[in-house]
Image: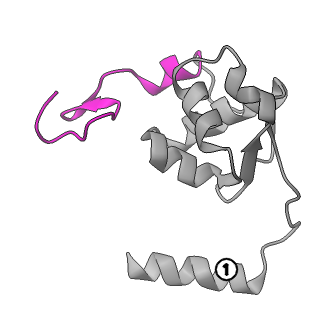
Amino acid sequence: MSPASPPGRWYEGEDPVVRPFMLTAGRTQPMHDGLRIETQVRAVPAALSAPLRFEARRIVELCQRPTSVADLAVAIGVPLGVVRVIAADLITQGYLHLPEQPAELSVTLIERIRDRVRAL
């Protein structure tokens, strides 16, 4: 691993060690539609004892409390599209569920997002 790449990431230097399509079996579209970047997902209690591997296991570990799809992508260091596909698979398999989601984003939430983007 090169000194420039953070430990635990799927990149070595500038090149990915594992190509994103390998993590999703070549799929680019999630099986469960409607996973936006702000969508909160949560693991069901039995998911920790499920026979999951690699990124799916890490997502279940991180989702012991509601966690957004974007936060999952950052936490495990893979592209957002990959997390959407893996999370959708976990929802379909019954390991993750979607807590109640607002139909539309509140003005307060939109303002918080705007302020955080400006802070970048």
Residue lying at 65% horizontally and 53% vertically, measured from the top left: 67
Q: Amino acid at mark 1?
A: Ile
Which of the 4 image quadrants contains residue 86?
top right
Residue at 59% across, 15% down: 25
Instruction: Work out whether residue 51 or residue 119 is closer to the camera in this orientation and state it.
Output: 51
Instruction: Name the residue rendered at 85%, 53% in the picture.
Output: 99
Dot 1 surroundings within 10 Å: few (below 14), some, or many (20 or more)?
Answer: few
The one of 64 and 1 positioned closer to us in this rendering: 64
Give the residue drawn at x 55%, y 53%.
Answer: 71
Relative to 16, 117 lies left or right: right
Residue 44: image x %, image y %?
Answer: 80, 36
Q: Secondary structure at mark 1?
A: helix
Q: Nearer the viewer, residue 57 or 37?
A: 57
| Rendered position, 87 above or below 75 | above
Say which quadrant the N terminus sits in.
Answer: top left
The magenta region covers: 1-25
Q: Position of residue 105 (x, y in %)?
A: 78, 73
**Image location (x, y in percent) of residue 7:** 26, 36
